[in-house]
Image (cartoon, rainbow, N blue to C red):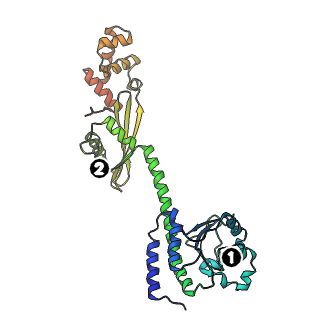
Amino acid sequence: METLISQDTQRLLYAIQELYTLHDFSSFSARALAIVHQLVPSEAPAFALTNLQTQVISNTFLPGYPSWPPEMEQVARRYWREHPIVQHMPHTLEGAYKISDFLTQAEFYRLEGLCHQFLRLIDCEEGMTLFLPQSELRSHVVPLQLNEPLVTIALNRSQRNFTERDRLILNLLRPHLFQAYCNAKYYHQMQQNLAQLHQSLNCLNLIILNHQGQIQSITPLATQWLHTYFAKSTHPDYLPDHLWAWVRHQISSLTNNHVPKACLPLHIAQADKQLVIRCVIDPINDRYLLLLEEQSLSLLNSLELLGLSQREAEVLHWVMRGKDNQTIAKHLNVHISTVRKHLESVYRKFDVQSRTEAIAQALEKLGVFNSLPLN
């Protein structure tokens, strides 16, 4: 049985360590091939992904080493099934195999496609091939999955001088190559998922806070709305004091600390728009989520929902805009006494005594708070 010398073992362990640093899926094939080539050199190394349905092969080559021109890619596809290592699948899927494991040199020379139209054109007469599993459950009794690419490392030499030491190194490296390949693929998928998540969060206009109220994440539009509707925060990494006070109030109202709970929204009015803020408390992860939404504010229609007549709502609407009775009468084209009459009716319905109290009562009933003046 072939054994490795101490130097081979050290180089193999270093190669395994290097493999697990490969996170970029787009460059994995070239970097992994370079690692293999350092352990088992060849004149024409290649990393290939083969579509088993179409037999289209996508190759990666090392700089400075032979690569296949387009016409040779077509030859490789045409004679793919002529390759003895392909012919002896699924047996050859389990480790590193050479062409000479199945064909004598004379038999190899009789292969018109593989020998004369492919390998000999790059001055190679021997190849050792290593397939990576298609899944962690790969075994010789499991059929090939046509929807998954066949990952292949092909090492080609001008002479039949691959050794059992070369085969042993490749076989020992194979499970680590496979795991590193999976890691890079999963990392790439996570990056894509994270990018999609960031896009979704930007659409949600989200603020994520830790339990101390420090902003851990905030979308661009949420940042803009905070600056528009609140006084500037004294600490840029924290919420404005008014908003953080509201969040703390929602936290204190929780009765179940084990189930995330949505609280009543906060409405901040400014001109003809309002900012609606919803707080979701996640005690399991010890964080708070604020969902922000800006809405057009039709205050006049909202006032009618409080039990006011159309005229009473119109009068109170102008009162809330700071207009006096005479100005309101001109806007509504009515006598000033009519304005007083409607305003007195509003007082009775709201059980208040003054314009200021009527405004405050309307805002409270609507769940709307005036935005604080900006610094």
Task: Indicate left or right for 154 with 114 as reference.
Answer: left
Marks 2 and 1 close (CB-CB < 8 Å)? no
Residue at x 51%, y 64% (from the top left corner): 27
- Can you say which quadrant of the picture contains the C terminus? top left
**Which image quadrant for residue 262?**
top left
How much space separates mark 2 and mark 1, taking CA atoms?
A: 67 Å
Task: Indicate left or right for 107 with 150 as reference.
Answer: right
Residue beneath disc 2: 214
Considering only order in the chain, which callout, 1 or 2, is on the residue closer to the N terminus? 1
Residue at x 57%, y 68% (from the top left corner): 61
Query: How far from the left and from the top, in percent, is residue 57?
Result: 64, 66
Q: Which amino acid does label 1 sit on?
A: Arg
- The reply to whether residue 133 is in sight is no
| Classed neighbour count for the residue bearing mark 2: other residues with Cα under 10 Å, few (<14), some (14–19), many (≥20) | some
**Label of residue 120 in the image:** 1
**Above or below 170: residue 3:** below
**Which image quadrant for residue 296?**
top left
Task: Indicate left or right for 324 with 309 as reference.
Answer: left
Q: Which amino acid does label 2 sit on?
A: Gln
**Above or below 323: residue 172:** below
Query: How far from the left and from the top, in percent, is residue 286?
Result: 33, 55
Q: How many numbered marks are there?
A: 2
Query: How far from the left and from the top, in percent, is residue 151?
Result: 59, 70
**Which image quadrant for residue 246?**
top left
**Above or below 248: residue 165:** below
